[in-house]
Image: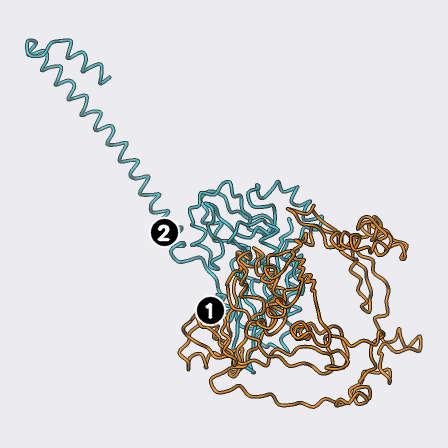
Chain colours: A cyan, B orange
Amino acid sequence: MATRYAFSLDLDRCIGCQACVVACQAGNELPAGDRFIVVSDIVRGQAPDFWGSFAHQRCFHCGEAPCVAVCPTGTLSKWNGLTVVEPEKCSACGYCTDACPFDVPHIIQNGVSKCTACLGLRGQVVPVPDTQVAQTLKDGHIPWCVQTCPSQALRFGDRETLLTEAKGRVAALQARYPKAQVYGETQLGGLGLLMVLLDEPSVYGLPVDPKPPLAQTLWQEAVQPVSLGLSALAAGLMGAMFFVARRQHALEKAELHAAAADAPAAAPPSAAETVEGKHD
Amino acid sequence: MLPPGPTGKTRADGAREKFLRGATAMQELIEPMVTGQPYPIKGLVLYGTNPFHTIPNVPRTKEALQKLDFVLTVDVLPQDHVAWSDVVLPEATYLERYDELWACGHKTPYIALREPAIEPLYETKPGWWMARELGLRLGLEAFFPWQTAEEYLNRRLSSLSLNLDKLREQGGVAIQKGKPYLADFEAEGASPFGTPSGKVELYSEALAGAGFDPLPEYEPLTEAPEGFFRLLYGRSPVHTFARTQNTPLLNQLMSENEVWLNDRIAADLGLAAGDQVWLENQDGVRSGPIKVKATPRIRPDCVYMVHGFGHEAPGMTRAHRRGASDAALQTRYALDPICGGAGMRVNFVKLVRES
């Protein structure tokens, strides 16, 4: 079985320097104003007794990714655990932006923009053929953010290994932070970005049980099947109406011929021929 | 007092007179430039420093620059002080030039190569080239017995049986074993600490001998006057000093600074996050407009701002007049009588709502 790749982010080690943000923008040559990572401050309490941490908003590479499920053009797909992008397929419909429970993909310059674990620059075909990517990863492919992180808060590699490590970190951290936990072990088919949190997910603005929006679920499970049925019904009715109309038309034509035969002076035969020719 | 330095001359910055010892105290050179005491200063070469952002009391610095016969500035950016220079030599950036070897005498010492990735753009030249060309024209050929930076660096590296090619082969860094542990010194019967006791000294006989408190005691600070806050400043991890605010990616990430104000105080003052205010210090000096950041992270009697913003130079196109300058509000400072450092968190500001 193919390796399931993933990121891990240890928020006890993150120092909020945003080097990951800049390395990602520079390394992926993102257009001005675009970015794949947003880091923000979390503060609780009042000086001098306060607690602070950093929240990261970036692609979680969900195991069962709502963006992939909703993408009508195949731009977004899963590859060895990562949610990758083939930008040349994108129609900029924006379904993924509505579907993502973490508000991650966005449309910039008529195309979807989000983290692809640095599997190719924006504008290139991603993923490249599997063998080639596998080779790249084997040769030590490390996304820019992970390469740059000065406090080793970010990691990339085999998801099972990272999960074991993350659990070990949580066990060690619970002495100081009783609510420390791994986020992403099971949510949405298991996330491809495992976060070591120091507190409840809500403190970091993360949903405990992320789900695609109800509208999307309704759309995919109710509206789409029903509309498919309705479309089929409409097509059937169209067919039936075609035969009815054709029969009606044949009858009208016969009546016209009969009228022409009854009154040859009023309508010359050449005119009747023309009409007939047009209709055939 | 320490004895005079090797030359026996008085130093303009007051080392050994106004303060005990240490490297040059840059801010102490401003008064001698203005007054000509203890001796006249005629010229100044500014290389890689922005005096309007690093030296307190900017108006006095401008006065000093006007007194000088000659100011030469070497910089990679069209910073504020560049317009105050007689001659400007635009330097190639660090990605376009060789620099001196980066030699770190840490407990694990290393030498790192600093070499160009691309040729210099526009009419810029590397600093070493400027120094050499100026030296040759000033009759200082003896100090430049080399033609190129490569030649100079190879000569330096030869003492380690290295050269540029070999250093590049090993990744640009030569690391020595060093003596990172106390045991490394103990094995030699030596101490890593240059103190009389050979230990970390909490009580310093050397300081006592020089007339200072051998065990410094806490001295309470002056409280902020009514309606004022103590002005603190510091760094953001995004920016380095006053020199990266115009860098596109970093400017995009943080294009201006904010004045941090305790959230409860902000509420009392009727100020909300994002409100625009002006800061006015105890001497009536006023900053440019700056946005309020109401936060529980700061104590109620202080305000804080990230250093390095409020660039006045129009050439700093992205950073021009974005945020406010802390340095402009630091009209006062306290001199550390031991090392000559400038303590600049001794200024007080009030928040003003209209310009």
Q: Which amino acid does label 2 sit on?
A: Ala
Kind of residue at badge 1: Pro
Tell me the quadrant of the picture where the C terminus of chain B can be found: bottom left
Q: Which one is closest to the eye, mark 2 or mark 1?
A: 1
The image shows residue A114 at horizontal and vertical percentages of 53, 52
Query: With respect to residue B119, does B82 lie above or below?
Result: below
Of the 4 image quadrants, the one containing the N terminus of chain B is bottom right
Name the image quarter holding residue B156.
bottom right
Disc 1 designates what residue? B289
**Cα distance, mark 2 to mark 1?**
55 Å
Residue A117 in the image, given as x and y percentages of width and height: 60, 52
Mark 2: give few (<14), some (14-19) or many (20+) Cα within 10 Å.
few
- Figure quadrant of residue B246: bottom right
Q: Are marks 2 and 1 in contact (CB under 8 Å)?
A: no
Q: Give percent across and percent down for residue B110.
A: 81, 62
Q: Is mark 2 on a helix, strand or loop?
A: helix
Q: Residue furthest right?
A: B188
Above or below residue A131? Residue B183 is below
